[in-house]
Every structure is written in C-alpha cells, then in structure tokens.
Amino acid sequence: MVENVICTFCGSVCDDGQFDIEQFKSKKLCKLGSSKFSKKERIKAPMIDGKEVSYEKAIEKAAEILVNAKKPLLYGWASTVNEAIRLGVILTEKVRGIYDQCASVCHAPGTLAVIEEGLPGGSLGAIKNRADVVIFWGANPMEAHPRHGMRYSISAKGLLIKDRKQRKVIVVDVRPTKTAKLADDFIQIKPGYDYPIISALRAIISGNADVVPDEVGGVSKEKLMELAETMKNAKYGAILYGLGVTQSRGRDRNIENAVKLIQLLNRTTRWVIWPMRGHYNVVGAGEVPAWEAGYQYAIDFSRGYPRFSPAEFSAVEVLKRKDCDAALIIASDPAAHFPKAAVKHLKDIPVIQIDPFPNMTTLLANVVIPSAVAGLEAEGTAYRMDGIPLRVKKVVDSEYWSDEQILEKLLEKVEEFKG
Amino acid sequence: MHHALHIKNGIVIDPKNGVKAEKMDIFVKNGKIVEESELKGEDVKVIDATNKLVVAGGVDMHAHIAGSKMNTGRTMRPEEMRVVRNIANKFRAAIGRVLLTSPAIGYEYTKMGYTSVFEAAQPPIGALHTHEELDAIPMLDKAALPVFGNWHFVLKYVAEKEMEKLKAFIAWAIERTKGFGVKVVNPGGVEAWMYGGNVSSLDDQVPGFNVTPREIILSLIQATEELKLNHSVHLHCNRLGVPGNYETTIESIRLASKFSNDARQVLHVTHVQFNSYAGDSWRTVASGAEEIAKTVNAMDNVTIDMGQPIFGHATAMTGDAPFQFTLHRLTGSRWSNKDSEVEGGAGIVPIAYLPKNPVHALQWAIGMELGLLTDSDKVVLTTDYPNGGPFTEYPYIMAMLMSRKMREGELEKVSPFVQKASNLPAIDVEKTLEEVIHMTRSLPARILGLPNKGHLGIGADADIAIYDLDPLNVDTSNDFEKIYKTFKTAVYTIKDGIIVAKDGNLVEEYWGKTYWVDATGRVDLEAIKADLEDYFRYYSVELQNYGVEESWLKKPERIVI
Ligand code: SF4
Ligand SMILES: [Zn+2]
C-alpha cells in the first residue's frame, strides 16, 4: 500500500490517498479520483495516421509538423505537470506558435477580473482553519470536487473553526445543487442576476440599503439584508465561486463586482474570494507561462516575443479564424468541448495529440502520442486550485513515456530541424 | 564552457581584500579565482582589461524575483509585460517593464554585472513554487528566505519559551523549504491581520497568543545565533509604511544589542526607507532617517538596506498583508491578497512613484539619506525590487550616492516638500567608488555569510564584472552621467568563470546554483516530531507531502552547518 498518494483529477488535489499496487486500486479518494486511479482504456501505442510506430518516429513526425507550420497552436496543459508545461511554453516560443490552455474556455473571466481589480484571496488551509462563513457562488463542489468540503471548506476541522457547527455555509445558485442540500442557507437566484445581486449587497454593506428595490434577481430585499448582515458579522469569510458566475451573463464583470464587495468587507472584517478551479493543474497551466512569458493564456509568440490578447489568441478564436495551420493538443479534449466551427478547422489541419487516454480529439489527430498518467505513472509538480504546489508521485512503473519526456525529446527534435 | 581566464591589466577594487584601485591581473580556473601559477599548461583565454574597472559580480541580498506574489503581480498587470527586452532566438524571449519574466530577470541582472540575487520572502507553504521560479531564472546564483514571524509554531514556542524546540523547528523548516535563513515580516502583525487588525508597537499582544513582536524578534535572533546560520535574522519591521514608524524601527534595531557575533551582524533590517517616517500623519510626515542612521552607526552588529524608491512604475508586494491593504485603500489601486495556511500572508498592489507627489518625493529622499548617512560598512544598496522600483536602476543610486551635484539636479525636479521634511538637500556626503562597490558586493556577501562571494581573493567564486571605467581617472562627483551609464552595462560579466555577457549582449545561457542551509545536524528533530504531527492536522497538506526535496532543484548547493 502506498500512502499519501496525490490525486490528479480535480483541483482539490487531495494528497491523502492510498494506493494498493497489487489490486491496482485506490482508497480514500472520491469516485472521480478513484476512477482515474484504476485500470482504464488507454491509447496503446504511438500512431501516425492510425499506424502504430515507435515513440521516436511519432515524435519526429510531430516535430516536422510543428517546424513546417507557420503558426501552430499548442493547447491543453491543464491535466499535466508543470515540468511538461514549462517545456511546452519553451516549445511554443521556439516554433513561434500560440500557447493556450483550458482556462481560456472556463475560468478566464476570473483572470480578466484579476487584471481589473486584483484577487484578495487565501489558501484553502486558511479557509479550513479560520473561515466561520463560506459562500459557494455558482459552484457545486459536492459534484465537481467531492472531497473539497470535507478537506477544506464545509466540514473541515480547523484550528479555530473546530467543526461544522461553528461554520455557516451558504450556497448561491440558480438551482438546488447537491452542495445546496448541505448548506445552512440556500439562496436561489434567477439565471444571469449575479451582477445586480452583488451590487445590491455592496449597496447594503456600504450603508445605502435605501437604493435597493424589494427584490433583486429573485431574492427578496429582506433576504439580501440578512445575507449582508451575515457577511459583515463574519470573523473570516470566504466566497468560493465557480463557472456558474464566470460563464453566466456579466462574466468577468461579475467577478470584478464580487472583488469590490470583498474589498469593502475588508474595511471592517476579513474576507477572501477564490475561484474553484477544475482540473488538477489548470492553475499550473497559467502560472508557468506567467513566469516564463508574462501571461497566463492566449499567448502568441509569432513575433518572437509573447503577446496576450484573449479575444484574439485564445484557442477557440484562433481556430474559428483559421489562424493556425497545425495544432498540438495535450492533456485535454477540444474536439469534445469546442464549438463546431473551431473543431471543423482542427479537422482540416495536422493535429498532434499527447494524452494517456483516447478521446474525441484522438479521432481527428494525425499523430497520437500516448503518455504516462501523472500522479500514477509519472511525477511532477501541480498547483492545487489555491495555487499551493504539490509534487505528485510516481506510484507504479509503466511503459509509457511521461509528458515531460515526450516534450523534452520533441523540443530537442525541433531544435535539430531548425538548425 | 569552462575556460581558464587571464584578466589582464585591469584596475581592481576589492574592498574585502583591501585592494583600492590597483592595477592587477586576475586568474580564473574551474570557476574559481586562482594564483597565476595554477594556469600553467591550461588553454587560457586572455581578456584585456586595460584601464577598466574589475570588481566582483554584484550581490543583491534583497529582491523579489520568484514565487506566487511575483507571479500574481505579473498576472494582475499585463500592462507591465509589454516592454520587449529580448526576442527569442539563441536566448529566450524576455519581456517586462518593472515586473520581468524569469528569463528577463536573469538576463538583466547579468547585463548589469550582477551574479547573485536572493529572494527575500518565501511563504513556507509555497516553497516549491518559489523554487520553480528560481529555477527558471538563468545565469544567477540564488537562494530564498522563508518567512517565520507569524508562523504559529514560532508564536507557540516563543510563548512557551521553548528555545530548543524553536531551534529544531527553524532547522526543520529551512531544510523543508530549501531556504537560506530566517526572514521575519511584520512579526505578529500578519496574524493580527487575519482578524482585520495589525500590531501598533513592539509590545502589542498577538491575538490568540501570549507573545509580543518584541519577544518574537528576540527569540528568533537568539535561535538563529545559537544555530550559527550563515545569515542573521532578516527583519522587515512592524508598522511599515506608517508615519511615526521610525521609532519602532529604532526600538527594533536596539534589540540586537543583547547579542554578538564576530563574523557578521546579528540583525539585518531590510528596506529601511519604508520604516523611517517621523510625524504622526501623512500631513506631518517627515524623515526619520538621520536618527536611524545614527542608531545603526552606533551599533556594531546591525546592518540595513536602503529600499530606495525609483521614480516611475513599481509594484508593491510584501508578506506584510495588512500594509498592502492599507496601501490599496490609500491609492485606490488593484489589490491581491494571499493568506496562507497558519503562517503568514502577502499582498500585491501596483504603484507609481511620482516626483511631484510630496510623499513619494520624501520616500525617495529618505532612501538617499539612509544610504548617505549610514556607514558604508552597514548599508546595502537595494530598491526592494519591485517594491521601490526596478533593480535595473541600481546604477542611478550608485551615481547619486557618489555625486552631490547629481543630487542637486534631481532635487530641483521633485516636490519642494522634501526641502522641509528631509535633510537630503543639506547632506554633502559623497561616497567613494570603493564604498559603493562595497555596498553592492563585499558587504552583502558578508551579511549573507557567503565567504566565496563579493570579492576577488584567491579561492573566491569567479563571479566578476568588468566596467568601462578607469577608477584612477574618474571624477565621480562630476561625471555622474558616466557613472550611471557605466554601471548599466558591464563590458564583461563572468559567472563561475564563464563569460555570460559582453557589452550588454548575452553570450551564453548558464544556470547558477541555489544555495540552501542545512542545520538539521545541530538540533534534535525528535523534539518537535509530536508537535509537527499535531500541527499538520491544521495544514491542508500531509506532513509527508510537505516540503521540497533537493533532487527537485536544478542545481542545489547545500551548505551544512
Ligand atoms: S476531490 Fe478531486 S482531488 Fe480529491 S479525490 Fe476527488 S477527484 Fe481527487
Ligand atoms: Zn522585500
């Protein structure tokens, strides 16, 4: 039995798992996590146009595609480790392509809000130990991050907050989620009304309750007054927001408004706000390019230096505009998630895929390079949703090359071809 | 590639070894400075340094170059990233105005003749992130100082007067974070911030603990001295950025008088400019620099660094989370905050220092006053990058310290408030070239406890900078423009005996070492085992998963004590 195994499924990055090598089975992880740590259908071998080849051959072909492309797109990264991501950024720079990562289709509005207002946050450990009020806003951890509540937020036993009774949990959402059932208070709002509700709370807390109408976004003024009161009286509060806020009407403006609410609350008490990020290392997929190239996503290197423009250089925009002539897709499945027009262009250009598991993107990839599963078959650094770094482990041996190994070789080949 | 080098006919200033502008040859083999006789039979590359200044590579002992606050700064400020410094080719693309990308940090320090830079605040839970960024910085030697002043363990052991356990904990924590020494940021104040507060004096009680900032500082100095760490306690004082704080700073400095150490100071107080304000509000604020300089000069075991603001853009980022919130309220600017587990916090706020703004001009004047009035053997040149401004402007500070004439010119451009609120206009001190070389090389190396750095004696690391300046024929008082230009770009920067930059162009990508200090052999780690296990129930990572292994670092250099 291997102890303290680190789960590489969701952004909770639970590090208390156990893994029974004999039975190939994990313990303590949630359903999502244990399915990642079980035998699953794998891509069997590297392939070029459906024909099995050696790693070396596949990598050579991939390098050829990237070097011959005018502007390749290198997309994905959220489910691999920092060591691979770093090589990916350097590779993108070398081939003067575009680096983009999964956040550009989910939490990017949160990043835009950071640019406007900042991010007054705290680590999950700070929340576990101190938060007497936790608000999940458009986030449903019980389904997306099943052990989050137990480890960090809802029922986590902290230093100052000893148990569930000492912590008030509030869910704000458009429908009663599984998380809402565990909450002390569930506030159901009309879809698309996050912004006005946050504005109303700001008005009440800053002493301007008189401008708030009787009802905002399906919530009575009375209820809003009560929520504002709870927030003001919290000793240490946390808003944890999800895609329900970033992907509904208002997008980045919603987060900006929420950050302003947090700024206001900090004048009299302590509050933090933080996004509930999805994949286990989607944070690393933004942090690594930030220190290597200055930006988190949607980075174009075609001029030999990085430029950032989400409306221009994010993967979906680039594909829709047919502004890339090859793609490397790693640790993600755009064919299943991107809009039709974007997927259509992917079908028209040479695509390289690096992934442990077959998915929709495999079907349209010209070069497929299977990789080891990080956290199970390969090690490396990942950043939990709160940016806390953890070194995920190699628990079992495997025939597959790690993402890091593949990219190292690929970079070497590209350098060789470029001379 | 390692060449043996013969640096010929240079004019050497090497304060540690008492060399004052002497014509000398320097010999290098295997990354070290050696006697001429060692080069027999070697393939020697000769560098003609005739009439050029030859000094040790610069050592920056306090800058923020890596870790989550730096990276949050980049994320929050894409406007900072639009200055292109290097286009990708043989070297990496490098961008940034004041906040630079990791490759840009390595390149720009190198072009200036700096070869070692220490990251001055490493949050313990984020230690691995700090090291990942340090490892992404080419060219330089590096290290990181983990922060201790609000760590619950420290507060607990200080309250219980458990000195042996405190020492064991420090040794354990430095080993786990692959850190270099003990950094203290606003001791007790960041814990108070978790309840929206701060501390207002050295004798405030830290909420939830029966301790005061005074006791925390004293205990940490005692533990650091008993452990004989390379570097002393590195203190960011309480009440940073508050008018009237100079008294607290002086009180903190005096705490060192109870200790002694023959090799180095027992307390280094950092970016003192931000802690040198007299008056009781921003209306009545004035400089307290003279008093502070007097206090430091009168003691033989305290050093400081300037934290000199540079007019223009900067980004405030410190572990002093309550101060950062105050700054956000003061300026109305963006604000990021990072409360981390049960040990500390951090904040990040953009700022621009404007010459006509009375407070900014005063801050600028105070930094200079500290640099001029403090003994050159006790004050290091820093901007607390990126808090006070870019490290790329160190040559500006060097020139200002050496030239009263330059200061007079600059004074004309700033708010007249400086005339009445500071003594800068009346100061006629002009530091010598040798003193400024000391303040940027030998002194920081001594303060950090790195005997092989900051000098050119036999056995020293071959970190060398050559500048186009003849020290025997330069009038530093009047030729300040030349001084500024000269120190902006080294003719040669040599790291570990390898030429890494020439005339402002990068020559070779090189990876420096990361120093870390292992003092675990001096303590009984068993003594804190039960406490660690107990405490980690409150951490959000498992004890077994916490920390940074040496093998994860690119080029670790372990210093065993
Ligand atoms: S909550 Fe997330 S990280 Fe934790 S076990 Fe489940 S899937 Fe893995
Ligand atoms: Zn600092």
Image (cartoon, coloured by chain):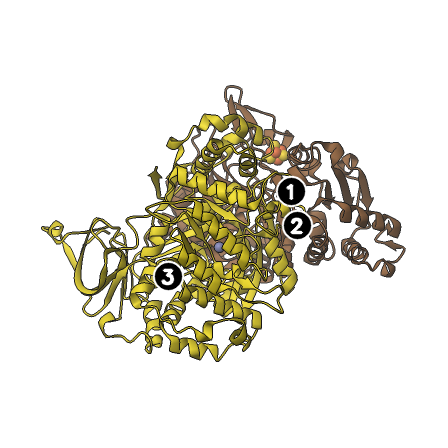
Label 2 crowd bin: few (<14), some (14–19), many (20+), radius 10 Å: some
Q: Tag 3 or tag 2, which sits nearer the N-term?
A: 2
| Image chain in yellow | B
Closer to the camera in the image, A408 or A11? A11
**Residue B89 can be seen, yes or no:** no
The reply to the same-chain question for discs 2 and 3 is yes
Q: Which amino acid type is shown beneath numbered disc 2?
A: Gly
Task: Spot the residue most to the right.
Answer: A214
Q: Tag 2 or tag 1, which sits nearer the N-term?
A: 2
Q: Which quadrant holds the C terminus of chain B? A: top left
Image mark 1: chain:
B
Closer to the camera in the image, B53 or B201? B201
Residue A156 placement (x, y as % from top left): 67, 33
Provide the residue designation for mark 3: B375
Q: Nearer the viewer, mark 2 or mark 3?
A: 3
User: Which color has been applied to chain A in this rendered view?
Assistant: brown
CB contact under 8 Å: marks 1 and 2: yes
Provide the residue designation for mark 1: B207
Label 1: element kind? loop
Image mark 2: chain:
B
Label 2: element kind? loop
Residue A152 placement (x, y as % from top left): 65, 36
